Image (cartoon, rainbow, N blue to C red):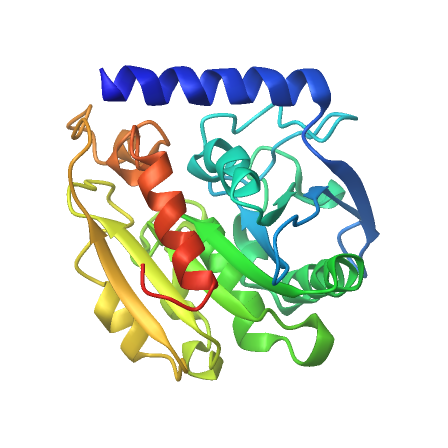
Amino acid sequence: MRRLALLFTLLVAAGAAQAQGCGEVLSISTASAGELRAAFVAPTAQPAITLVLLPGGGGHADLDAQGCAQKLTGNSLNRMRPLFNGMGLGTVFVDAPSAHQGGDGLGGYRIAPEHADDLGRLIATVRQRSGGAVWLVGTSRGAISAVNAAARLKGDAAPDGVVLTSAVVLGDPRARKPWVAHSVFDLPLRDIAQPLLVVVHGQDTCLRSPPTESKRLIAATRSSRSQAVTVTGGPGPRTSDRLQACEGQSPHGYAQQEQAVADGIARFVRGGRY
């Protein structure tokens, strides 16, 4: 019954968001990737904290004029977005830039210095608008983008902290497309000094995000405050295919555990423990 109640709450929240809009659409001109669009909801609690949400896959959410995702709707961060807002946290749900909305989406651009610069422009804009801290939250392949930005950016463009959920930690160098070999370990993790939360699911069977690497990931950084968390429970794996297991409605995406994970992230970004 509790699972059904949570699902009903999420569906109601999603329906209300579609009716009322999902946030102000920000448009950032980037140096090399065209227009970067993101749906911004300002924080309502103090101290003001805004989460920049970086979905996985190709990253192309196809935001409409009301800031609602037309694609990646099952992504865990898209599902958690209204929960964060309900706790007074601001959110910025980020679409792929206009130059990277083809079949591969962000693909190999996720590790490019230019991609970090794009996100830095967005962070600086959001910090000016919100007047508070700005954190990067990346899930699955979105974690590659988050690590790229956190490791490279400085000053007002740098995030105040980083949250990685179900991060891609293993690539496949034999794959036909070179970017499939990329993982967070291809980036200068040692340059991350901000607070860092790494969340995995103990039953995640996705080929790219085995839950055994979270402590190694943190150890590769210089994070000033860090925590590795392994989530358990939920409905369990829904497929034996280790690539299909990378979809959002699975342990990889914390299916039916959205509220608990969102609560833990909120506690950490506010200075506590998950």
Q: 83 and 79: which one is in front? A: 83
Q: Quadrant of residue 132?
A: bottom right
Q: Position of residue 237 (x, y in %)?
A: 17, 29
Residue at the spot x=69%, y=62% of the render? Answer: 123
| Residue ID at (70%, 71%) | 157
Return the residue nearer the eye: 177 or 113.
Answer: 113
Residue 182 in view of the camera: no
Residue 79 visible in this rendered orientation of the protein = yes
Q: Quadrant of residue 181?
A: bottom left
Q: Quadrant of the N terminus?
A: top left
Q: Is residue 66 left or right of residue 250?
A: right
Q: Is residue 17 above or below residue 198?
A: above
x, y percentage for residue 147? 48, 66
Query: What percent of the width, then of the height, locates residue 89?
Result: 57, 49
The residue at the point 71 percent across, 25 percent down is 21
Query: Residue 161: percent from the left, percent from the top?
Result: 51, 69
Looking at the rendered image, the quarter that the C terminus falls into is: bottom left
Residue at 52% in and 29% down: 72
